[in-house]
Image (cartoon, rainbow, N blue to C red):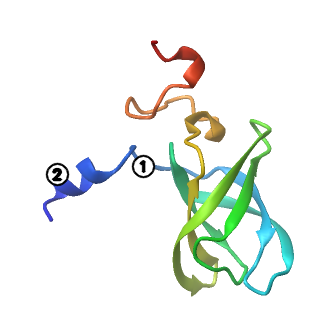
C-alpha cells in the first residue's frame, strides 16, 4: 500500500508526544490495577503507551489525564511485544476526545468539540 493510501486511511493525525496519564482497569488475570505511564503517540481517537500489565485485546481501560482532569473509557486495539519498558498498548477512545490530551497545537483533522461545530 503506498504511503499516501496508508495516511488517508487514518482518522486523525498521530502526534509523537509524551503525556503523563493514569490507566486503570482489570488485567487479563481479572485483577484491578492503576498505573501511571506516559504516551508514545497520541491522536484524536486514542494513543499508544507502555503498560506493565498482562492485558487482553478489546479490554476496556479508563485513562485519566491529571493535567486536563478528564477521563476517557478506551478499548485495547493493539498489543505489542513486551520490552524492558513494558508492553506497547494501543488504545482507542470509545468516543473521540481530541482535547483529552491537553494539546495546544491540535492538528486540523482532529474533530472540534460538539459545542463549536457548525450546525
Q: Residue furthest front?
A: 119
Q: Is residue 80 above or below residue 65?
A: below
Q: Is residue 80 above or below residue 63?
A: below
Q: Is residue 101 above or below residue 19?
A: above
* Camera-nearest residue between 52 and 73: 73
Q: Secondary structure at mark 2?
A: helix
Q: Is residue 87 left or right of residue 27?
A: left
Q: Position of residue 6 (x, y in %)?
A: 23, 57
Q: Is residue 78 left or right of residue 5?
A: right
* Camera-nearest residue between 93 and 6: 93
> Which label is found at residue 60?
none
Please report contact status of discs 2 and 1: CB closer than 8 Å, yes or no: no
Count all numbered tags in the image, as a single digit: 2
Residue at screen point 50% across, 42% down: 44
Task: Rate crowding at label 2 as few (under 14), some (14 to 19) or many (20 or more) other CA atoms within 10 Å.
Answer: few
Sequence order check: which comes first, mark 2 or mark 1? Answer: 2
Q: Position of residue 5 (x, y in %)?
A: 18, 54
Residue at screen point 61% across, 33% down: 99
The image quadrant that residue 52 belongs to is bottom right
Q: Is residue 1 left or right of residue 90?
A: left
CA gap between label 2 and label 1 equals 15 Å
Residue at screen point 60% across, 52% down: 18
What residue is shown with label 2?
A: 4
Residue at screen point 58% across, 84% down: 83
Q: Position of residue 66 (x, y in %)?
A: 80, 44
Q: Residue furthest left?
A: 2
What residue is shown with label 1?
A: 14
Q: Position of residue 103 (x, y in %)?
A: 58, 35
Q: Secondary structure at mark 1?
A: loop
Rendered-image quadrant of the N terminus? bottom left
Task: Rate crowding at label 1 as few (under 14), some (14 to 19) or many (20 or more) other CA atoms within 10 Å.
Answer: some
Amino acid at each position: 500500500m503506498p504511503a499516501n493510501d496508508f495516511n488517508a486511511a487514518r482518522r486523525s493525525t498521530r502526534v509523537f508526544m509524551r503525556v503523563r496519564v493514569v490507566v486503570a482497569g482489570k488485567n487479563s488475570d481479572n485483577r484491578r490495577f492503576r498505573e501511571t505511564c506516559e504516551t508514545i503517540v497520541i491522536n484524536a481517537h486514542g494513543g499508544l503507551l507502555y503498560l506493565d500489565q498482562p492485558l487482553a485485546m478489546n479490554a476496556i481501560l479508563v485513562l485519566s489525564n491529571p493535567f486536563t482532569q478528564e477521563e476517557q473509557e478506551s478499548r485495547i486495539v493493539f498489543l505489542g511485544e513486551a520490552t524492558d519498558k513494558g508492553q506497547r498498548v494501543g488504545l482507542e477512545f470509545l468516543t473521540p476526545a481530541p482535547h483529552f490530551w491537553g494539546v495546544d497545537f491540535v492538528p486540523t483533522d482532529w474533530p472540534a468539540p460538539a459545542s463549536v461545530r457548525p450546525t
